[in-house]
Image (tube, rainbow, N blue to C red):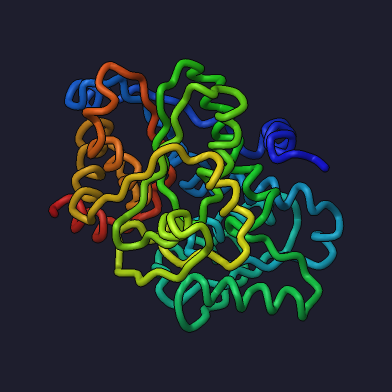
Amino acid sequence: MTSLLDRIMDAHRGIRPEVPVSTLERSRLLSAELGCDVWLKTDHLMPTGSFKVRGSANKIRTLGEAAKRTGVITASTGNHGQGVARAGKLAGVGVTVYVGETTTQAKMAAIEALGADLVVVPGGPLDAEQEARRQAEQRGKPYVAPYNDVDTVAGQGTLGVELAEQAPDLDAVFACVGGGGLIGGVGTALKALSPRTEVVGVWPAASTCLLDSLKAGEIVETPESPTLSDGSAGAVEPGSVTFPICQEVIDETVTVSEVEIGHAMRKVAEGERWMIEGAAGVAVAGLIKTAERYRGKRVAVVLCGRNITLETFLRAVAM
């Protein structure tokens, strides 16, 4: 059986040049203020403004000719839908995206602009996932999961391969956690290629389903509140492949408040002149909150996306 690491390395080669290598850039402001050497992985500058292009491109690639004949169905809070829509457009594959009614209008418009059909489902992200899976089964079309799929996770893991190549001496990497696809893939790559690097998962305190599940030893339901990190919000699908992966690869966990997320987004805007979305702010906030532990060390933070409206961004940084 092909290991997840083998799949990640295959994806690292196979998704190029459609998916570029994102840069790793030093933050002078954060480094000076936090007392550690801070590097930012710029996946917010990727096509569609999110790391999700990685897993989407890899999944469409592995589906091959069958997907071109039938088209694919997926579910998304926004960024994954854009990634699949783009990958489908480039590969000549029809894409239908199911979203929950809480998805922002800006992200829904972006999905449609990339040529995908959009279906809005009453409820939240998990409702959209479940309905999309039902429709895919009924229609005989492949389902492209936002995180609960080994090929999707492998695509996200290419970010970890890039980090190991760009900075083999990293002491820690911080990433926001939603369904676990990003940190699961990145963590798997780093455990093999840079085992000294600590993998730190960061959650908004308002949405901690996977964190609570890891603590419970099984996937559990968790009450949620509105959060700036809409890209990571939502329950984890029962039986998700990411759960056992994350049990193995996450070394440390951090939760951050909405005020801390907004503060982190402001810091990145001040220091780098970048407007990042809430999920990226979560990862930065996790480092800021625990910076004392990493004084004098070299750390990286995954800026996972930039898809946020100006109104929401301004409200966040004013907290």
Query: In percent of the image, x 38 and y 34: which residue is there?
Result: 301
Decide: is 196 above or below 243.
above
Q: Quadrant of the N terminus?
A: top right
Name the quarter where the C terminus is drawn.
bottom left
Residue placed farthest to the left in the image? 318
Q: Is residue 109 visible?
A: no
10 left or right of 205 in image: right
Give the quadrant of residue 240.
Answer: bottom right
Q: Choose between 214 and 60: the one closer to the eye.
A: 214
Residue shown at 46%/16% (left/top)? 169
Report x, y in % for residue 250: 48, 41
Q: Looking at the rendering, which quadrant does residue 42 occupy?
A: top left
Q: Is residue 38 visible?
A: yes
Residue 280: x and y in percent read 36, 45
Image point (60%, 75%), residue name: 130
Q: In the drawing, does residue 108 fall left or right of residue 317?
A: right
